Image (cartoon, rainbow, N blue to C red):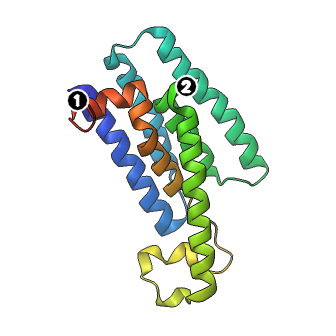
Amino acid sequence: MILVILGGVFLALCLFAALHDINSLTIPNWLNLTLAGLFVPAAAFSGLPMEIIFGHVLVGLATFVIAFGLFAFRVFGGGDAKMIPAVMLWVGPTASLEFIFSMALVGGLCAIVIVLVRNTVPAVVLPGPIRAPFEENAGIPYGIAIAAGAFMASPASPILSQTLSSAGLIG
């Protein structure tokens, strides 16, 4: 039951990060630290062997190094570069490719939609909570893509699949 709660909180925080990113084009540090920190008790309550948990940690660390490099070259914002490794801790090596593919696909779709809307609709007519990405020279709220990737890769993740299965969301 504790694992279901932790996994549910993780997924809810991913959704919150996406919504926060749409509104402000930022993902707060406290949120990324919480996502990563929740992995520790989730791993302890998962009952998975240490080598699988170690694989999750290795993938998270490797992703942190790569994301930091992408941040240094201004490919990602700082919040995105911290959220991706935090999510990779949870999805682990078995779901990492599904996460990356889903994240890239949704990120590309978001970019296309935002560019199309920027070129056709003045930002001032859009509702305030979603206006930030549509302002001139604004970035892309990649938290949407990261959260979508987390949700799409969840069934393939050892820890998150236990959460979804216990909640009756997957077989």
**Left or right, 23 with reference to 66:** left
The residue under label 2 is which amino acid type? Pro
Name the residue tied to disc 1: 166
Mark 2 element type:
helix
Which one is in front, 94 or 131?
A: 94
Dividing the picture into quadrants, the one containing residue 7 is top left
Vertical relation: 152 (above or below) 59:
below
Q: Nearer the viewer, residue 110 or 34?
A: 110
Residue 144 location, x and y as percent? 49, 57
Residue at image point 44% right, 38% down: 35
Q: Label 2: which residue?
A: 93
- Apparent side of residue 108 relative to residue 147 in the rendered image (left or right): right
Mark 1: few, some, or many residues within 10 Å (few <14, many ≥20)? some
Does residue 30 show up? no
Q: Earlier in the sequence, mark 1 or mark 2?
A: 2
Q: Quadrant of the C terminus?
A: top left
Residue 90 shows in the view? yes
**Residue 32, position as x, y percentages in the image:** 49, 43
* 85 to 54, vertically: above or below: below
Which label is found at residue 3? none
Q: Is residue 129 above or below residue 167?
A: below
